[in-house]
Image (tube, helix red, strand yellow):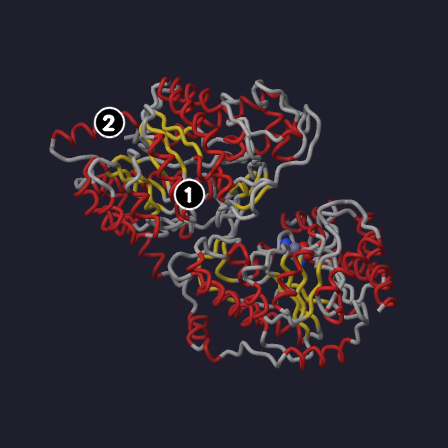
Amino acid sequence: MEWSADNIALIENSLRKGGLTMTTIHNLGFPRIGVQRELKHAVEAYWAGKQDAAALENVGRELRARHWQVQASAGVAHVPVGDFAWYDQILEWTTTLGAVPARFGQPEGAPVSLDTLFRMGRGRAPTGTPAAACEMTKWFDTNYHYIVPELTPGQTFRIARESLFDQVREAQALGHDVKPVIPGPLTWLWLGKGDSFGAGAGDEGKLALLEALLPVYEDVLARLAKLGVAWVQVDEPVLVLDLPPAWKQAFQAVYARLAASPVKLLLATYFGGLRDNLQWAAALPVAGLHVDLVRAPDQLQPVLAALGKDKVLSAGVINGRNIWRADLDAAQALLAPAAAALGERLWVAPSCSLLHVPVDLAKESGLDAELRGWLSFATQKLDELSLLARALGGSPDPAAQRALAAQRDALAARRQSPRIHNPAVAARLAKIQAVSRDRAPFAERIAAQQAALSLPAYPTTTIGSFPQTAEIRGLRRDWKSGALGDAAYEEAIRAEIERVVRFQEKAGLDVLVHGEPERNDMVEYFGELLAGFAFTQNGWVQSYGSRCVKPPIIFGDVARPAPMTVGWSAYAQSLTSKPMKGMLTGPVTILQWSFVRDDQPRQETCRQLALALRDEVVDLEQAGIRVIQIDEPAFREGLPLRRDDWRAYLDWAVDCFRLSTAGVRDDTQIHTHMCYSEFNDIIASIAAMDADVITIETSRSNMELLEAFEDFSYPNDIGPGVYDIHSPNVPEVDWMVGLMKKAASRLPKERLWVNPDCGLKTRAWPETEAALASMVEAARQLRQAA
Ligand code: GLN
Ligand code: ZN
């Protein structure tokens, strides 16, 4: 029997007659990209002028219809509407509110067009004048990026797009009971930025905009009510953050006012516990509250106590941030008291929107059956919810009982699988405290390194990758598909390495790199060579706009069956007498950009990664590589949402970096790279990583962001990026000299390196050659002036 909305209703009725209640299941949001990334392909074709707006609208409509159907068939009551977005859900809402920055030339009073939305997201669209895109930044602690609302004092708002209402009607016409989903006013303001406001998200000045904003919220809610909508989900994930007092007060005032609206509000919080916000947030005058019980199961009891006697509790018990099958017995045990206490007022849901997981496991034909049995993507998570609701109802039908038993078996099999447990890794981890994390003091190391490397003042280097031409990507593709044999592939990659080495020698760079032509992606490359990783064929997750990523899955103990980079690096070193830098991705970054196992703490997995990398570092050293870079671009984004949790994270993250690097001699130089520049809060931990050289992004901030390093008297070497690799523009020599002089006014010049902001893989050769030639010239002038 199909588990459709209709027979849910039937069963609900029969259960009620028998004195039982059926727990409502609902969903906070569904991935919009489509299982074949249809949305990506459609918007990209539209941007390229290969498909018109009507065709694009059709694809959107089809995807929405399909996704609503998937949800309704799983028994989801009130399917979410408003989770669909052409580019980003915050941008959808920003344009709905009419908050379009002046440079996009939005005519007053006119509806905001789709092309204006695209221009805000990416600077250009098939029609309209190109303008600087709005800033994009990470969505809480996920790898999704949203478009930052731009705020100005005195700004006005109005309903400037109809898409939300249109989509409500669209879903209703398909027979669905809908629950619109909108960002809450406080979360939207918190995420916004403006020159007239402080840099911190919590700037109080932004709250003054509420006066103009709230009437538009009231209008939206009134219009939704007119469409027959009963529930509206208002997302306020900022409730899991450290909120300044003014924001806490604003929550009370805002929801006291919105309580008068003619719909029921479900206030949704996710990505963590409410903690100090729990008492008052649970008492806000809304009809329902959603809480994340995956990240914070302990908050169930206090939430129940604070909830009041009429409110619906939506319990987020299926992990919306990871891809493992859920332990439904544990979820049932957790929720049983709540089900008894709340009856029909208990709803169950994923912990957060399913935006952060791939669409459908059924499309994964490449995974072996055992591994597949452990996994659950968005579509499967809804089936899990449905099962959980039936289990909570007390008398699951035979089909549900069979499904529950199968789920139990799959989990038990996973726990015992020899594919997860590697005794050698366990034995090594048991003795991890004895593994050294300490090297000699930096002063001793750098002296030994200078003797070994004899580098000039202001040494020049690059971050690792060189242009990845279509030809190189073609080589890798053909080799993977088997069209190109191992020997031919190796020969072609070697030729590319030689070309990159010869170029760097000619350009006069001091520490060379091999260019990374063998790497598709800095995490995937290592994941494919390490044990304990699996890769999906279609496990796409939206990262930003039309861009999707396919995170590896770390399912078991991580081990390194064989060296991963030594062959390529040793070959590159054999071509030159200059030092060749070995190039690795750090443990925290590999962890951060993968789906990680949920059966052990994250730091445990990170330590396993660190030990595997340590072996690689030692092998590189033994192969004659004297400079080794361990990239940690995701180090900062791993920071927990709450300050109280920072210390613990930073301690293990720093420890893992040191574990991976401390196996080398004093005269082997360890570099790290982080492509951002906000170090104010974490500079002590960056220093504690104790890399000999750190390269960072600074060119766009005019070296001002070196202040954190200056104030801390950062002791080790540092390479502040002198030009922005995101732009094809060739930087001027004088400009780079000027930047380095600014750097030298903040930090000892003996500690400074000269390098670009990040890797060059997205650049083309001509501009790369010109830019690096200018950069080397800048270093030469700096040395002369010194
Ligand atoms: N070594 C990598 C590269 O050069 C670093 C990439 C990054 O920082 N994201 O591409
Ligand atoms: Zn970078």
Residue 732 is left or right of residue 386, and the answer is right
At mark 1, the secondary structure is: helix
Q: Is mark 1 within 8 Å of ligand 1?
A: no
Q: Which mark is residue 237?
A: 1
Residue 267, horizontal then vertical, whole percent: 35, 37
**Crowd class of label 2 (few under 14; some 14 to 19; many from 20; radius 10 Å):** some
**Quarter of the render that holds ligand 1:** bottom right
Residue 562 vertical position relative to residue 197 in the rendered view, above or below = below
Q: CA distance from mark 1 to mark 2?
A: 31 Å
From the top left corner, tell me how far across and down residue 389 is, in percent.
Answer: 25, 39
Q: Label 2: which residue?
A: 9
Q: Give the crowd class for mark 1: few <14, some 14-19, many >=20 residues within 10 Å.
A: many
Q: Position of residue 109 (x, y in %)?
A: 57, 18
Q: Are marks 1 and 2 in contact (CB under 8 Å)?
A: no
Image height of 389 relative to 325, above or below: above
Q: Image point 61% across, 41% down: which residue?
A: 195
